[in-house]
Amino acid sequence: MGQKVNPIGLRVGINRTWGSRWYVDPREYAATLHEDLKLRKLIMEMPETKGSDIAELEIIRHPQRITITIHTSRPGVIIGVKGANIEKIGSELQKHTNKKINIKIKEVRNPDNNAQIIAQNVARQLLARSSFRRTMKQAITNAIKKGNAQGVKIRLSGRLGGAEMSRTEEAKEGRIPLHTLRADIDYGFAEALTTFGSIGVKVWIYNGMKYGKEQKEDAGALLRKRRDRPSSRADGTQPARADGSESARGEVKAEPAKVEPAKAEPAKAEIAKAEPAKAEIAKAETPKAEPAKIEPAKVEPTKAEPAKAEEKAESPKDESPKDDDTGTKESVDVKS
């Protein structure tokens, strides 16, 4: 009695998102959910979408409209000639809801790496009575070589090859870590309605691990981040942990705080030592200032200057009779 879990449903909120995105009153939840299921079923069963390889249907509800995004590897089949098919699809869906419907088409770039499209292709080949073993091996080879998948697993269940008893056959290549939540695993399911019964097709594709921003942090990671934050205490220390021990950051911050006063005290002592040195320099400079008392010596030359002036004044009187020109100039100087 194996209890299997859908790989996409298990990873919703981790590295996958919801196929339907809306929020309604709890009393309207059931009716809205069944309306979504009805729209999905109508799109998949319409003749306009037959053979279009629809990989996913996204439904986003707005207050006045519903946006349906169709992911397909053959958008030309759904759009039709000059958009005729998509208009038929829109008008048919509009009959089953009261809100305005907006349809968007999005192309799947790599159909060989999409689990749902691979499952539909395998089911289509089983309907054409092809060998199921060869079909499985070919799908796995294309997914790894063309789709660059790291692991593929395909499981078929039913009356394989028209046998009387139903059985299960499985083929896989690479690794498919179903229990690893961060693993990017795509899952697809399809049914082949043959003349001797229905055959179920399940496909798992592993595309590597998803790290970084796409996965949400758990409560333990958030708690560790809060502990590692710098504290807002005035003394710069960090609050003690739950086990009573102080954090490493708090200890590192506390040690320099004790060392700084010790460095400051010698600085004061040096300043105190420097002050007497300044006083000695001041004392040494004051005796040098005493020679400034020799100012009277500077004044004496000023007293002597008049004497020189008198000599000059006397000399032109003696020399005036000799030279008239020089005497006139000197006499002007004396008057000045």
Image (spheres, grey):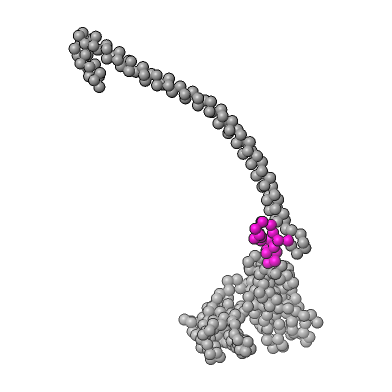
- Viewer-closest of 308 and 251: 308
Q: Is residue 230 magenta?
A: yes
Dominant SS of magenta comes to loop
Q: Left or right of 290: which side holds 150? A: right
> Is 210 or 226 nearer to us in this picture?
226
Residue at 53 percent of width and 25 percent of height: 287
Q: Nearer the viewer, residue 254 or 90?
A: 254
**Start-end of magenta stretch:** 222-240
Snapshot quadrant of residue 318: top left
Give the mark count. 0
Where is residue 124? Give x, y as percent.
65, 81
Residue found at x 73% / y 61%: 240
Q: Tell me, yes or no, if residue 41 can be seen here.
A: no
Residue 227 vertical placement versus 203 (above, below): above
Q: Determine the residue located farthest toward the right in the rendered image.
A: 1
Q: Quadrant of the C terminus?
A: top left
